[in-house]
Image (cartoon, rainbow, N blue to C red):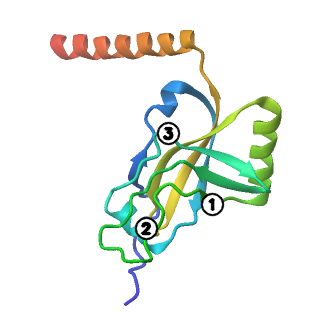
Amino acid sequence: MARPRNQTFDKKKPVAENRRARFDYAIEHVYEAGIALTGTEVKSLRFGEGSIAESYAEVKDEQVWLVNSNIPEFSHGNRFNHEPKRPRKLLLHHREIQKLHGAVAREGMTLVPLSIYFNGRGRAKVELALAKGKKAHDKREAIKERDWKREQQRLLRDRG
């Protein structure tokens, strides 16, 4: 049976997030990349399992690979189950790959995955950020700003 056509294609269903990335890195540009997965990996992600907290991406031989991401084995998988921490190929346009390679090689930037999600068509996607590492004083400034915003919200809530 065919899938109904009146679905919204903007909806994102996040599976795994790297919340620490926005704190540790100054994000310059964000790309959306497809990810080449096996069947049992997709099933594990659909069950909400998976982690990209300590993962990164690298450009090798004009291809982008997601390294050190953990998608646990599917519980009902048989002998065709996947390896949990294998490198996974990211699907990007050739021109995007060239831009990423240039930024990483020349400017010393890092490719950090921000989240894995399913788009409206049911495809697994990775939100990949081109980022530069923050220094300690930048992180302290971010903490102060976050605490001040929280304090402002508390004061407004108490007053009103």
The residue sitting at 33% across, 57% down in the picture is 48
Q: Residue 7 in the image: x percent, y percent?
A: 40, 70
Q: Nearer the viewer, residue 54 or 83?
A: 83
Amino acid residing under circle 3: Glu
**Which three-letter amino acid code belongs to the residue tagged 1?**
Lys
The residue beneath circle 3 is 54
Horizontal side, residue 44 vs residue 139: left or right: left
Q: Residue furthest bottom?
A: 1
Could one spot residue 160 in this view of the protein?
no
Q: Assign a secondary structure to mark 3.
A: loop
Out of 155 and 138, give the one closest to the viewer. Answer: 138
Mark closer to the chain start, 1 or 3:
3
Q: Is residue 95 above or below residue 154?
A: below
Picture residue at 75% right of the left edge, 30% below the top? 108
Q: Which mark is residue 89?
A: 1
In contact (CB < 8 Å): disc 2 and disc 3: no
**Disc 2 marks which amino acid?**
Val
Of the numbered discs 2 and 3, the one sitting upstream in the chain is 2
Horizontal arrangement in the rendering, residue 100 relative to residue 4 (left or right) = right
Write down the quadrant of residue 36 in the picture.
bottom right
From where the camera sits, is residue 41 visible? Answer: yes
Residue behind mark 2: 42
Residue name at image x 82 percent, y 41 percent: 102
Q: Secondary structure at mark 2?
A: helix
**How many C-alpha atoms fall within 10 Å of the one at disc 3: few (<14), some, or many (≥20)?**
some
Q: Position of residue 16 (x, y in %)?
A: 41, 49
Which image quadrant for residue 151?
A: top left
